[in-house]
Amino acid sequence: MKVKILELESKSEVKSQIYLVTKNKSKLPSINDGWRFNFSKHSKGKDFETYILKTNKTPEIIEGCLIINTKSPHQVYMAFVEVAPHNRGNEKRYDKVAGCLIAFACRQSFINGQEGFLAFDVLEEKEENQKKLMNMYNRKYNAVRLDDSTTMIILPDGSERLINEFLN
């Protein structure tokens, strides 16, 4: 799927693509490369689909990665989402990478007949970091927390807003 992310240095949109990774076709990001997750390890489940986001400008560099489960009965489950290490913090190269990937997962929920419901868990070692991350998901991506759990969900209206903002 074609998307646009924001190059912060030039303040211009950069044409990009989200690709489905077929088994053994791409080297996936790992902890050894400075990422928080080992995507090769986590993408092995039979019901999981792995996607990467790359720019047309530098197609050899992965800007973000997403693993979703589209086979759950009531919603699409976002198992992992992460932006590249060079897209984090004050010196990040691109913005809107996570938004595009999360909106893409929401879109997959509509495509798979799950009406736009997207669920995911926020698991951090420190409770304060977990709360910060949950607040950020709520503020930026319309996610709501289920009860007192670590599970968050994006409801259909929120999914539609993300799709309109990041994919259209």
Image: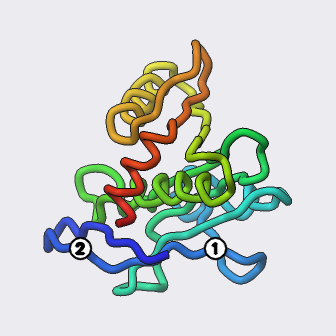
Closer to us: 164 or 125: 164
Disc 1: which residue: 20
Q: Pointer 2: residues within 10 angstroms few (<14), some, or many (20+)?
A: some
Is residue 6 visible in the rendered image? The answer is yes
Disc 2: which residue: 13
How far apart in space, not on screen, are marks 2 and 1 (Cα)? 22 Å
Q: Are marks 2 and 1 in contact (CB under 8 Å)?
A: no
The amino acid type, in three-letter code, at marker 2 is Glu
Is residue 31 visible in the rendered image? The answer is no
| Marks 2 and 1, the one that precedes in the sequence | 2
Closer to us: 101 or 27: 101
Residue 116 drawn above or below residue 124: below
Q: Residue furthest left?
A: 10
Quarter holding the C terminus is bottom left
**What residue lies at 48% left-to-right and 71% top-to-bottom?**
53
Residue 6 drawn above or below residue 57: above
Query: Could you say where residue 74 lies in the image, as x and y percent from the top left?
Result: 72, 39
Numbered-mark total: 2
- Apparent side of residue 140 relative to residue 42 in the rendered image (left or right): left
Closer to us: 35 or 95: 95
Query: Could you say where residue 147 lies in the image, as x and y percent from the top left?
Result: 58, 14
Q: Secondary structure at mark 2?
A: strand
- Apparent side of residue 8 relative to residue 157 in the rendered image (left or right): left
The amino acid type, in three-letter code, at marker 1 is Leu
**What residue lies at 17% left-to-right and 73% top-to-bottom?**
12
**What residue lies at 39% left-to-right and 86% top-to-bottom?**
56
- Apparent side of residue 124 relative to residue 161 in the rendered image (left or right): right
Residue 129 drawn above or below residue 31: above
